[in-house]
Amino acid sequence: MALGAVVALGFSVGAVSAAESTWNFNMWGGKRAFTAGIESIKADLEKVGGGSFKININYGDALGPRRQNPDNIKDGGFEAGQMCIGYYPNKFPLLSVMELPFLLPTDLAARAKVEMDVMHHPAIEKELADRWNMKFFGPAFLPAYEFMGNKRIETTADMKGVKMRISGLNAKALQVFGAVPTMVTAPDGYNALDRGTIDMFGFPYSYAFGAYKLYEVSKYVTEGLAMGGFMCFQGVSLDAWNKTPEAVRKAMPAAQATAIEKMIVAYETADKKWIPIFHKRLEVVQVAASERAKLASGAGKIWAEWEKAQNGKGRPGSEMLKFVQASVAKHSK
């Protein structure tokens, strides 16, 4: 990063130069349950580094637009950043397997284990390295998705014509029942609901709705849909990784394990805070298991279409889907 850019971002030149290895990390939004992982990793690795390593977490897209994080890391604009696959259509094609509807477990601990398995799969490591000169370093799993907004949804029939925010592959499950999927980034959700650009906003339940204050511009929230949503992770450029002190790199697995624990606690703490508020301020629509089953019934066809498309482009789609299914079975016991 250019010296002028560093000064403009508010970092002192002395602080940056004092560390042998510095990662400038780009994150949208402010501190919240979702950021507990990177904040934990920062603390653990800086402690191990003993002054030779530093992570500067830049909230609120301070280093650049969230939709350009992969490009900016590849081009050397900054060293590391938050990724969510749904923001980057076709940029992480093989990793998009993790956004197939109703594929991943809803249990947070199980989901975290599946995501760690997948992020260490050689084909995924190759996709990140070859396309983006990037390496996975931080887990960023999300709770299952519910919907909040201004249309009451209790059955699949209620979805017809409703503008619903959800990522691409999950959107296909909703489209079967007439929903109109619309992609809106997390920080834009409040205004989109307030202005009626969208009717219902899909988000990890419950922390994200609270963090972005969507309950202030909503009338309804669902409980029971428990859909998948974004597949997210934290990536760093291979150039920066290779310059990182060896002691820090060796400490990464333990830091990841602690980050997972911290994220689960943060999500559970958020539930205790936000769910009572939602129940007090909004109409909570309990979605029956039979309605969720209707949505999930078409998932197999969507999985098969994804697999065929990946195979057709020379990627190991079948191998990856089977790997994820085996990981889900292993960690859901």
Image (cartoon, grey):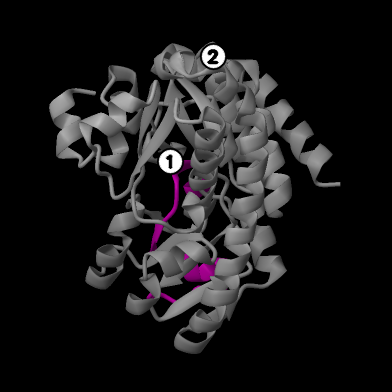
* Mark 2 Cα shell of 10 Å, populated few (<14), some (14-19), many (≥20): some
Residue type of the residue flagged with mark 1: Gly
Write down the residue under mark 1: 86
Q: Image quarter for residue 62? A: top left
Residue type of the residue flagged with mark 2: Lys
Kindly identify the residue that appears in the image at 71 percent across and 67 percent down: 290
Kindly identify the residue that appears in the image at 68 percent across and 45 percent down: 111
Write down the residue under mark 2: 126
Where residue 301 appears, as percent x and y from the top left, is 63, 39
Where residue 255 appears, as percent x and y from the top left, is 62, 37
Q: Image quarter for residue 304? A: top right
Relative to 153, does residue 49 appear above or below in the rendering? above
Relative to 37, does residue 283 appear above or below in the rendering? below
Look at the image and say whether residue 168 sits in the magenta stretch: yes
Depth check, front residue: 319 or 248 = 248
Q: Can residue 227 be seen in this view?
A: yes
Relative to 12, does residue 193 appear above or below in the rendering? below
Look at the image and say whether residue 55 sits in the magenta stretch: no
User: What stretch of residues is rendered in magenta?
Assistant: 150-171
Kindly identify the residue that appears in the image at 18 percent across and 23 percent down: 2
How far apart are the two marked residues, 1 and 2, measured between alpha carbons?
A: 20 Å
In primary-sequence order, the first of circles 1 and 2 is 1
Depth check, front residue: 286 or 49 = 49
